[in-house]
Image (cartoon, rainbow, N blue to C red):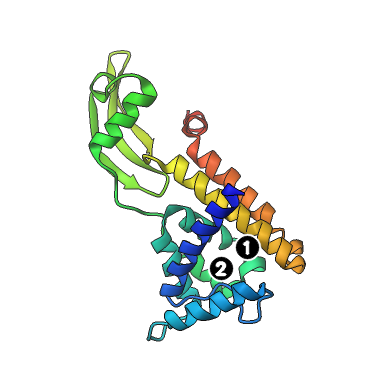
Amino acid sequence: MANAITSLARLTRSGLVVMKHGARVLPEDAPLPAPARWLLALLRRVWRKPAGDVSNEQRLSAALTALGPSYIKLGQFLATRDDLVGRELAAELSRLQDRLPPFSMSEAKAAVRQELGAPVEELFTDFGQPVAAASIAQVHKARVRDDGRERDVAVKILRPGVEQRFRRDLESFAFAARMIEKLHPPSRRLRPRAVVETLAQSVAIEMDLRMEAAAIS
């Protein structure tokens, strides 16, 4: 029960962000319980659609970007499912960029030390600034000494707290999928819960840097 309430609260906050962007996720005639319809109507009056010649697909894409890494990943995943979201929205979501400002060098070095058990100064002859930063991790160029010779390597480091954040958001997505299937039985043919499960598996693989290192080697 507590998890359901927490997920509902998170989804409500996310819904407010979507509405502030003037985007619409559900059609006007969506089969919702009466209290949900009243609340949705009230919120639409409070947050009127911003002026400007911007499509709903563009507004929704902007809202997902504002909501952060988990929602960007969700949008990118849904871009491959035009059977779920339609061709126009899928095309717009495919433009979502998985780029974020890098986290600090001190955080990166602390993460390396925690994972590998030694400071970067002992592990690398050089450890540079991040060259790429995305929602899950960032990449640093570095150099290591191997058999008396130095060679360049790329060090991929998970964002601080990213695993906990994705876990919370994926729990909320799973809750939403269950509610969609329960409140709107025809949606079951599109298997919303299976969509969230596949997204969770994809994120888990991307976060498992050991698998990535094995693939590179």
State the SS at label 2.
Answer: helix
Q: Quadrant of residue 158?
A: top left
Q: Quadrant of residue 108?
A: top left
Q: Is residue 196 left or right of residue 73?
A: right
Name the one closer to the observer, 133 or 179. 179
Residue 196 image position (x, y, % from top left): 62, 52
Q: Residue at x 53, y 52 (%)?
A: 6
Q: Residue at x 30, y 51 (%)?
A: 101
The three-letter amino acid code for the residue at tag 2 is Ala
Residue 90: mark in rendering:
2
Image x and y of residue 48, in percent: 43, 83
The residue carrying mark 1 is: 81
Q: Residue at x 49, y 67 (%)?
A: 15
Q: Residue 216, labelled with which disc?
A: none
Query: Count the marks: how many?
Result: 2
Q: Is residue 138 above or below residue 35?
A: above
Task: Give the crowd class for mark 1: few <14, some 14-19, many >=20 residues within 10 Å.
Answer: some
Kind of element beneath mark 1: loop
Q: Residue at x 41, y 56 (%)?
A: 68
Query: In the visual, does 9 lie left or right of 107?
Result: right
Rendered position, 10 above or below 198 = below
Q: Nearer the viewer, residue 148 or 158?
A: 158
Please tell me how crowded label 2 is: few (under 14), some (14-19), or many (20+) other residues with Cα within 10 Å. Answer: many
What amino acid is labelled 1 in the image?
A: Arg
Is residue 204 at least partly visible in the picture?
Answer: yes
* Residue 49 location (% of width, % of height): 43, 82
Disc 2/disc 1 C-alpha distance (Å): 7 Å
Q: Is residue 76 visible?
A: no
**Mark 2 vs 1: CB contact within 8 A:** yes
| Placement of 24 over or under 104, stated as above or below | below
Q: Where does the image place residue 90, in percent across and percent down from the top left?
A: 56, 68
Among numbered discs 2 and 1, the one appearing first in the sequence: 1
